Image (cartoon, grey):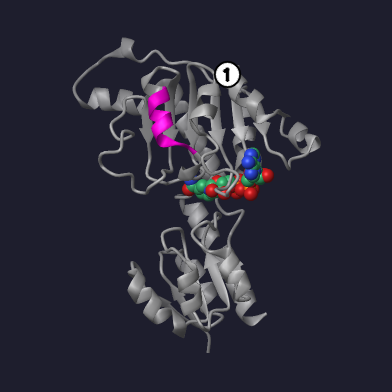
Amino acid sequence: MNRILVTEKIATEGLDVLRQAGNVDVRLDLDKPTLLSIIGEYDALVVRSATKVTAEVITAGERLRVIGRAGTGVDNIDVEAATRRGIIVVNAPASNNVAVAELTIGLLLCLARRIPQAHASVQSGRWARNDFIGWEVRGKTLGLVGLGRIGSEVARRARAMEMEVIAYDPVVSFDRAEQLGVTLVTLDELVQRSDVVSLHVPLIESTRNLFDRERIMQMKRGSYLINASRGGIVDEVALVEALDSGHLAGAALDVYAQEPPPADSPLIGHPKVITVPHIGASTKEAQLSAGTEMAAGVVTALTG
Ligand code: NAD
């Protein structure tokens, strides 16, 4: 009988699918030493994003044949180490496109109208209507860095709001971009033209610190940055400097270099920054489809 270890909360429907392939043990919030001491008993390991499946964990998992990731990004898994051992890594790539795209649009509108700040102002007993003169997204240029599954869904929604959408993605064809009503440009052109830049690339070596000081300073004066992809893509110190100097007008972040960010992070309490706690994929629909899509892949890998 296969044994499957689940270390993070996934949809009940996903657990039901996993049970078709063996016994499922749900052990939430395992610390690293405990995970290392028990992983050797399991044929499959199922995680979301918090469990770090390092080479050490993979080596200790002597029986492991498959690692399931209920979600998209696999940067918490050492895929190379897994592949070397012949372990299959299964994720759910399509499950949260819409959830992240809708959050991105939400953050865009929050930047334009300063909705979180306006809410906080009313809640503190003020009625400062003149402090909240915003701007309309219609006619503004949105620059998407990455036009994959999520970037494409953001593009569709931004086009529906009559934005001009430009994108930089080295593997996307002109035909595909045209279908989405998006103009492909170079990264230099994108940052120079966009009123709002939104990041939708994976965290890989070529994107780590892609938005460093130099790139941020290339952005149009008074523009905005949205990051609902991965924290390591933006240099947070350079971002805060650009906000403080007035070069950038605002930023909205779902992801951080360190999660949660330390209490003394300059991003916390910054008047020009909107922060949410990595909730891009946190919708009922995305959780359900992440759990079931990944579980089906794990079952196939164990039994197929
Ligand atoms: P995807 O693979 O469909 O698309 C990523 C795109 O980025 C690809 O088209 C690729 O060609 C492009 N790309 C890669 N390197 C690039 C570079 N240097 N410059 C420009 N483009 C580049 O992935 P996706 O499903 O759209 O997800 C994008 C990212 O969103 C994920 O990798 C993940 O990090 C993040 N994500 C975040 C959340 C969240 O909760 N906030 C949830 C899911 C995914």
Q: Is residue 237 left or right of residue 140?
A: left
- Amino acid type of the residue tagged 1 in the rendering: Arg
Q: Residue furthest left?
A: 125
- Please indicate, yes or no, whether residue 160 appears anywhere in the rendered image: no
Where 150 falls versus 126 (above or below)? below
Question: Quick one: quadrant of the C terminus?
Answer: bottom right
Q: Residue furthest bottom?
A: 1
Stretch in magenta: 234-242
Residue at 30 percent of width and 35 percent of height: 268
Q: Residue at (62%, 72%) from the top-left corner?
A: 84
* Residue occupying image coordinates x 53% and y 75%: 18
Residue 84 in the figure: left or right of residue 208: right
Is 160 a magenta residue? no
39 or 215: nearer the viewer: 215
Q: Position of residue 142 (x, y in %)?
A: 59, 26
Of all residues, the one furthest to the top in this rendering is 130
Q: Residue 83: percent from the left, percent from the top? A: 62, 70
In the image: residue 239, left or right of residue 301: left
Secondary structure mostly seen in the magenta stretch: helix
Which residue matches tag 1? Answer: 138
**Ligand 1 closer than 8 Å to label 1 CB:** no
Question: Toward which corner of the image does residue 30 lie, by quadrant?
Answer: bottom left
Whether the magenta-drawn stretch holds residue 241 is answered as yes
Q: Nearer the viewer, residue 78 or 3?
A: 78
Residue appearing at x 58%, y 62% in the figure: 91
Residue 148 pos. (x, y %): 66, 44
